[in-house]
Structure formats: C-alpha cells, structure tokens
Image: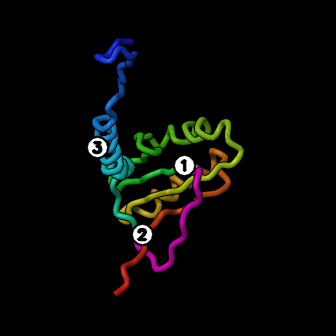
C-alpha cells in the first residue's frame, strides 16, 4: 500500500488482462473443430450403395475390408489368421459383442464370408454391414 498526494492509503489494482487468453482459446477451439472430422475419416473404402439404410448402434467394433483384401480393426491392419485372437482380446471384458463390417464393394463375396466366419468363431453374436445410401435421382 502506498500513500497518495492527499495522504490517504491507496492500493495497486493488479488485474489480469484476459482478452489475449480468450483470443487464444477461441483460435484453439476453431482448430479442433476443423481438424476433428479429418481425424475420424479412417480407411477409405468404396461402400456398396443401397436404398434403405439403418444407423449402426454405438459401441461396436468396426472392421474394414479394402479391395486389396487388407483387414483393418479400427485403424490397425490385421492378418486374417490373427483376426480371431484379436477380436477375442478386444471383447474379453465386454459382455455385448457387436462387430460392423465395412467392406469395399469390389471385395469378392467369398472373402467377406471368410472374414464373417472368423468373426463368428471369435464368439461375436451380432454382425452388421455398413453401407452407403443410394443417391436419389
């Protein structure tokens, strides 16, 4: 505390200027809003198109099968022969076992059935297919 010219005590007011902090936070928020959808894109496959489409329920494991016959468990490449053990490990603590297959439309039907067979051997009760909706003409 200091004495002013009149002999009264005065205190220094120290205030934090929050305007730069708010500016920085808004810029960070915009950056995260722009980049978040890009991080969620995953592996690019050409899905078959259908007229009816249902939304997959949340909480399931997504397996992606590319036209080169690569299998991705979420975003990691998995060998077909190791897929069963990886699925078992993934669902070890889960009671509800749901798998969704995103298969490229150019993948042979027999290969998709082979992947489906491995999924069933791993003890998964529910398997769904993820597709695109046809464009209305």
Residue under the image location 50 percent in, 37 percent down: 82
The residue beneath circle 2 is 132
Q: Which residues are magenta?
A: 49-61
Counting residues from the start of the chain, the first of labels 1 and 3 encountered is: 3
Residue 55 seen in the figure: yes
Corner quadrant of residue 15: top left
Tag shown at residue 61: 1
Counting residues from the start of the chain, the first of labels 1 and 2 encountered is: 1
Up the image or down, 53 lies above or below 128; here it is: below
Mark 1 secondary-structure assignment: strand
Mark 2 or 3: in front is 3
Crowding at label 3, few (<14), some or many (≥20) Cα neighbours within 10 Å? Answer: few
* Residue 121: image location, x then y, percent: 63, 47
Is 58 part of what is drawn in magenta?
A: yes
Residue under the image location 52 percent in, 41 percent down: 83
- The front one of 37 and 67 is 37
Is 107 part of what is drawn in magenta?
A: no
* Residue 28: image location, x then y, percent: 32, 41
The residue beneath circle 3 is 27
* Residue 137: image location, x then y, percent: 34, 87
């Amino acid at each position: 505390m200091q004495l002013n010219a009149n002999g009264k005590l005065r205190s220094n007011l120290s205030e934090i200027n929050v305007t730069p902090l708010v500016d920085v936070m808004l810029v960070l928020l915009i950056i995260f809003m722009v980049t978040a959808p890009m991080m969620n894109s995953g592996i690019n496959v050409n899905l078959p198109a259908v007229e009816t489409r249902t939304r997959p329920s949340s909480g399931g494991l997504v397996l992606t099968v590319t036209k080169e016959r690569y299998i991705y468990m979420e975003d990691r490449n998995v060998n077909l022969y190791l897929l069963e053990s990886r699925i078992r490990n993934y669902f070890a603590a889960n009671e509800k076992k749901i798998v969704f297959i995103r298969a490229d439309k150019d993948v042979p039907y027999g290969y998709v059935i082979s992947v489906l067979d491995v999924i069933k051997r791993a003890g998964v009760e529910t398997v769904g297919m993820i597709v695109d909706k046809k464009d209305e003409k």
